[in-house]
Image (cartoon, rainbow, N blue to C red):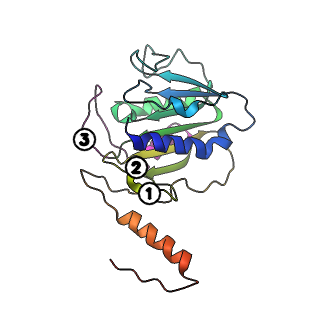
Amino acid sequence: MHKSTYLRMEYLVKYYENIFTKNKTAVHVLDIGSFDVNGTYKTIFDDLRYYYTGMDMADGPNVDLVPKDIYRWEEIADESFDLVISGQVFEHIEYPWLTIKEIERVLKPSGFCIIIAPNSGREHKAPKDCYRYYADGLAALAKWANLKVLHTSISGVPEGEKPGNWINDWNDGCLVAQKEPSEKMVTGQPFIQERRVPTFGYFDTVRIWEMAVKQAYERFQEKKPVVILY
């Protein structure tokens, strides 16, 4: 697990936490692809109100459940979880449209799912490497399962954060979606900056530069002129 995917999952969980934990004393979380490879998301859910279940296709560290069929989770009842997460897994799934339908099935009404998958990066079989995702592709998967898309982004960076720890060659794509009936809410967008250009050993900073200039101009335009040397 690379650092940026952990940061994004943690940030998105906290960003929407007040919605999917509303009026709940227990929040049941399913982590798809939970096998501990250089870290897991479990530590995000250290709060006692969270009940975390790790699921993967093979037994191992941080795995609580191994389904007999990776596309039909008969071991899990309908509407069992408040939140389903998955990070750096969907690129390895041959038939992700089947997986997203299972996510919708096991989510409680108004439950959330958060998926992070690479937009770029080298081939890495585990045991297969099938896809890279754009924002529209992640949204299409959610719509296929009748989930409401709340957010998509590529390599997003929150306001006030420096890009360094958030950006790498994997160019993380993020999806946040909700099972109907969805909440009516005004939350804005979690990431104020994005980088939607795939990377192959270099960083495209044009979008981040553009956003930074815009923010600086909006901040100071009433007080003094802005001179930009580029």
Dividing the picture into quarters, in which one does residue 125 lie?
top left
**Could you tell me how far apart the alpha carbons at marks 3 and 2 are, in whole angstroms?**
19 Å
Determine whether the residue tagged by mark 1 lies in a helix, strand or loop.
Answer: loop
Q: Residue furthest right?
A: 23
Q: In which quadrant of the rendered view does residue 66 lie?
A: top left
**x 35%, y 36%: residue:** 91
Which structural element holds mark 2? helix
Circle 1 is placed at which residue position? 162
Q: List x then y, in percent, for residue 40.
A: 45, 30
Dot 2 alpha-carbon crowd within 10 angstroms: few under 14, some 14 to 19, many 20 or more: few
State the extent of the magenta-drawn residues as a range. Answer: 120-148
- The label number, if any, that marks residue 165 in the structure image: 2
The residue lying at 45 percent from left, 39 percent from top is: 6
**Spot occupied by residue 181 in the image (x, y as percentages of width and height):** 67, 40
| Picture residue at 31% right of the left edge, 60% below the top | 204
Amino acid carrying mark 2 in the image: Asn
Q: Amino acid at mark 3?
A: Arg
Q: Which residue is mark 3?
A: 122
| Tags 1 and 2 touching, CB below 8 Å | yes
